[in-house]
Amino acid sequence: MTTPKKRSVVSNTALSYAGQAYTMLVGILIMPFYLGHLGAEAYGLIGFFAVMQAWLQLLDAGLSPSLVRAVAHQQGVAASQRNTGQLLRSFELIFLPLAALCCAGIAAASPWLAEQWLKAKNLPQQTLIDCISLMGLIIALRLYSTLYKSGLQGLEQHGWLNAANVIIATLRYFGGLLLVSLISQDPRDFFEFQVAIGILETLIFAVRAYQQMPAPHALSGLDWQLVKPIIPFAASLSLTSILWIVLTQLDKVLLSERLALDYYGYFSLVALISTGILMLSNPLVQTLLPRLTVLIAEGRQHDMHQLYLSANRFVCTFLVPLAALIALHAEPMIYAWSGDRSAAQWSRSILPWYALGSVIMAISAFQFYLQYAYGRIQLHVWYSVISAIVTVPVMILAVRYQGAYGAAMAWFALRAVSFAIWPTIVHQRLAPDIQGPWLRDMLRIAAVTGAGLALTDPLFRLIADDSRLSLFLGLAVSGLLTLMLVAMSDWPMVTRLYVLFRKPST
């Protein structure tokens, strides 16, 4: 196995942001074209696929993030004692029945979902059944591609990972756009194309994983002695994953049954934006978690705490102004992006609450990262259980009586209440010294963001008119000026973050 030169966290983060920024930007830019070429109902079907994919991550059972941690932890031991190849092979065999169950279960359920759940007006029922069956195959393939990515992430192979992700994203989105614009508007053809991309993606990451973590023998089987110590951690992650998906996806499932499929297509635009806010921190997290784990393994607790605070500050500096801008200018933002006035008008009272709730959830995730690094996620398990117990009845009632607007209000209110309570509990239990600096950062960023948007709102109104280009320009100017004000309110942040990320592991 070749051992690539180890990059600093700042280099890995830069690579991750470059790759994932491209992936997210391409997806966000291309999706409105899918709406235009396929129609609102077929786009709603794509939104339903995204929800199904999120729920079927439960099949992962916490194994992929456990593999990241196990592989990262082995980088701190002698090379002769590492057994990452055998560990990967064991996980491959565990995933085999899960992938088979995914394909068979979705195919069996597809007639009921098409007839009883989705409310399509124009799409033929057999088209719905075929598309849902293809979704099962795509999800099974992504289970395996995620497994291989997790192993490579644990090795901190972020440069290669993001280069490969850029290639796959280009094929998936631009290839899909060419298909629906020039060849076929049949959603079955679209999902068949996604199956082909899924096969290619899985093969690319599998080959790289085999190169970096070769199994001892071609026919190596499951090594229970390697897997057994990981099971308790994976089981805890599995439970929290189930509860996390309930917290983040229950509204989307309930609305997929309540809303007509064309309106669900509009809601999918809102969901895409709110999910994009959550995903913007992913590149940093992918490089942050292995490094936090390594610092704890090396006994450098103070450095780990400082890195945690700096990374949290960095993410909040960018995400809070972005989410606040979207919330303040929801309707013009949707119209400038999609060109669909009906979608913009339908979303204007829903998107603000989803955007604000999503940024709170992205920031709240840092408390989990702290527990993950310490390997002590019992607090997170209890938090997830209590949150799910509260969220399920609240969201069901909100959707039943107020539809999508009720779901949006409940989404924000639940996130806000938990954020007011939970971070303090986690910090006091694991790292009491970081609570004060963390709280000061939160208050400063929120206050400066509010002031920045208030100051730039007249400028936005001066620039923006009915044209999409002027709306884009007004949003960009307002957002960038607000971001600059927030960043300048703590100018040494970038320098401190760079210095901390440059510190190599010993």
Image: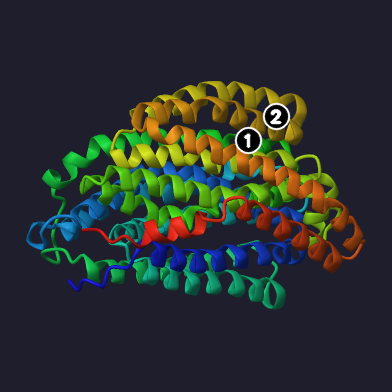
Q: Nearer the viewer, residue 50 or 19?
A: 19
- The crowding category of the residue bearing disc 2, from other C-alpha atoms within 10 Å (few below 14, some 14 to 19, many at least 20), is many
Is residue 346 positioned above or below 459 on the image? above
Judge left or right: residue 245 versus residue 205.
Answer: right
* Rendering quarter of residue 302: top left
Tag 2, which secondary structure? helix
Distance in Å between CA atoms under marks 2 and 1:
7 Å
Place of residue 367 in the rendered image (x, y in percent of width and height, measured from the top left): 44, 37
- The N terminus is located in which quarter? bottom left
Which residue in the protein does label 1 denote?
251
- The crowding category of the residue bearing disc 1, from other C-alpha atoms within 10 Å (few below 14, some 14 to 19, many at least 20), is many
Q: Residue at x 71, y 31 (%)?
A: 409
Judge left or right: residue 370 versus residue 26.
Answer: left
* Rendering quarter of residue 43: bottom right
Is residue 498 positioned above or below 257 on the image? below
Which residue in the protein does label 2 denote?
399
Mark 1 residue type = Asp
Q: Residue at x 48, y 40 (%)?
A: 365
Q: Earlier in the sequence, mark 2 or mark 1?
A: 1
Labels 2 and 1 touching (C-beta < 8 A): yes
Q: How many marks?
A: 2
Residue placed furthest toward the left: 80
Report whether residue 186 is seen.
Answer: no
